[in-house]
Image (cartoon, rainbow, N blue to C red):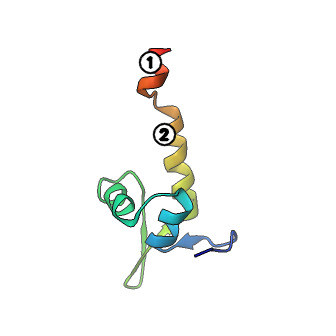
Amino acid sequence: MSTPDNRVVLTIEQAAERLGIGRTTMYALIKTGQIRTVTIGRLRRVPTFCLDEYVQSLLSSPTQLDQAA
């Protein structure tokens, strides 16, 4: 399932695909507040900039590999 790059918000499934993760992992990240979502009517959507924020937060926090070096 491919999504146009010009979308402002994505479904949970589209956001998971964009990150290359599964739906279950995506829902877990949303539940823990690591990825923010918006509600439009009765639909839950993920703003694309929230995916960017999540990836930036991953880059800014040191990993075990970073600490071993």
Nearest the viewer among 66 and 43 is: 66
Image x and y of residue 36, in percent:
42, 59
Closer to the N terminus: mark 2 or mark 1? 2
Q: Quadrant of the N terminus?
A: bottom right
- Residue at mark 2: 58
Q: Amino acid at mark 2?
A: Leu
Q: What residue sits 39% from the left and 61% below the top?
A: 26
Task: In the rendered view, tell whether residue 55 sits above or below residue 7.
Answer: above
Residue drawn at (51%, 33%) of the image: 60
Q: Is residue 62 left or right of residue 8?
A: left
Query: Can you give x and y, in whole percent of width and height, for residue 58 in the image?
Result: 48, 39
Up the image or down, 21 lies above or below 61; here it is below
The percent position of residue 39, horizontal first and vertical second, equals 41, 75
Residue nearest the observer in this picture, 28 or 47: 28
Which residue, as the protein is rendered here, is positioned at the far bottom?
A: 41
Q: Which residue position is annotated with label 1?
A: 67
Q: Residue at x 47, y 63 (%)?
A: 16
**Residue 62 x/y as whole percent:** 46, 27
Q: Amino acid at mark 1?
A: Gln
The circle on residue 2 is none
Badge 2 crowding class, 10 Å Cα cut-off, few under 14, some 14 to 19, many 20 or more, is few
* Real-space CA distance between mark 2 and mark 1, rounded to the nearest whole angstrom: 14 Å
